[in-house]
Each structure stands twice: as C-alpha cells, then as structure tokens.
Amino acid sequence: MLVNLLRSHPQVLMHGELYHVTDINDPVDGWARGGSGAPPPNARVFDQRRRNPEPMLRHVQCHNGGRSVVGLKVFRDHLRPHNWPVLTGWCDVCILLRRRDTHAQYRSLAIARRTGKWKSHVSSVASGSPANASVVALDGTEYGMWANNNQAWYRTVAEQLAARRLEASSAPTIVELTLEDDLRPPGDQKPRLEKLWRALRLGPSTTGGII
C-alpha cells in the first residue's frame, strides 16, 4: 500500500523488493519502469546483489528516470544483518513502517505462509493449502521469536542511522509511519502522509535514495 502511494507521486520512482524478487521485471515487486525509461540492473549486479548490495544501490540511484526521488522496499530477511549498514549508509530518507497490532501482522504472515498467497502472488510450493484467520493459532514461541527479530531489525536500523548523524555532514531523515495511524487512519479515508512528503522535500533540485 505504501509503495503504491509513493508511486502515485509524479516525482517518485519507487521500486519493489529488489533484494528479494527472483525476477527483476516482476510487475509488483520488481523494477518499476512506470514510463520512466530507467533500465533495470544487468544480470551480474542482480545475481550478486545479496553478497554485494552496493552495485544495486548505485544503479538505483544513478537511474532515477528523471524523478526527484528514487527508492526501494526492504524487509529484514532480504539481506544478511552484516549488509544492513550498506542500506542505511546509502539512503537520504528511511521510512520505517510498522503495524501497531503485531498479533494481526503475525497472523497475516502465518496465513500467507500456509496458503502461498502473498498479495497477488501465489507460491507454487504452498498453493492450495487450506487456511483462514480462524485456524491460524498464535504459537507463543514462534510469535515471540518473530516479534523479537522484528524489533531487532527496527532497532538496528535506527541505531545505524543515528550513528550516521554523528559521523556524516548530511544526516538521513527518518520517517516513522504505522498502518493504523497513517495509512489507514480511523474515521478518515485518506492516508495521512504529510510528514512523508515533507521529509522527501519533493522538488526539482532534490535527488537521493529512500528505503
């Protein structure tokens, strides 16, 4: 939802899960052309992106398709923790999207794993497996491990960005959003993204990366 909202802005070229997709041209989570004419990375850069994340990031930033802002989407398991600093060292703006109802988030992940249905994608391995919200149990051990790992990811990213503020002359901007308050606010049909647009400073002289 957030990626689609970013893509709706004419000055943003927002890619999907470039460190996760198996097909760089995946129409949902791959390289977003969107009429920009920006070419995707070559096979060598794409194949080595997890071992060596920097060439992919350089390619993303150098091929912004004439947009003011270019970015990509990352989850914690897309890269090994020792490569997280590469991401936090690259970006000018880091959007940290959380879900306050972590139990609901865990349930949705459990359903996706059982059914193989991730948004519009269907895994060939798990497709056809029956599941619904009523039969997905909240296993205390598994949920606890997942929740701890999730918090560790957010905490580590925040710490690395804070370290950049002390070391670099140009500090990255952190925008913290939640699904419930900002993307789907209660009693309001419109997402509340004013702080996001302010942080991106959208204008003709702005270039940079967002994760």
Image (spheres, rainbow, N blue to C red):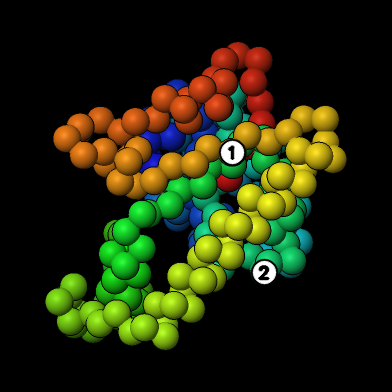
Identity of the residue drawn at 25% across and 30% down: 190
Q: Is residue 30 visible?
A: no
Q: Gap between marks 1 and 2, in whole Å?
A: 22 Å
**Split into 4 quadrants, where in the image is the C terminus?**
top right
Residue 166 or 24: which is nearer the viewer?
A: 166
Residue that numbered label 1 is attached to:
174
- Asked whether, in this view, residue 140 is left or right of residue 209, the answer is left
Residue 79 or 169: which is nearer the viewer?
A: 169
The percent position of residue 195, horizontal first and vertical second, equals: 46, 27
Residue that numbered label 2 is attached to:
80
Identity of the residue drawn at 42% across and 25% down: 194
Residue 39 or 173: which is nearer the viewer?
A: 173
Q: Is residue 2 above or below residue 202?
A: below
Picture quadrant where residue 93 is located:
top right
Q: Amino acid at mark 1?
A: Ile
- Asked whether, in this view, residue 143 is left or right of residue 151, the answer is left
The percent position of residue 150, horizontal first and vertical second, equals: 51, 65
Q: Is residue 199 above or below residue 131?
A: above
State which tag comes first along the sequence, 1 or 2: 2
Residue at the far top: name it: 204
Q: Amino acid at mark 2?
A: Arg
* SS of the residue under disc 1: strand
Front tag of 1 and 2: 1
Mark 1: few, some, or many residues within 10 Å (few <14, many ≥20)?
A: some
Q: Is residue 196 visible?
A: yes
Identity of the residue drawn at 57% across and 21% down: 201
**Split into 4 quadrants, where in the image is the N terminus?**
top left
Mark count? 2
* SS of the residue under disc 2: loop
The percent position of residue 173, horizontal first and vertical second, equals: 63, 34
Q: Is residue 85 above or below residue 64?
A: below
The percent position of residue 155, horizontal first and vertical second, equals: 60, 57
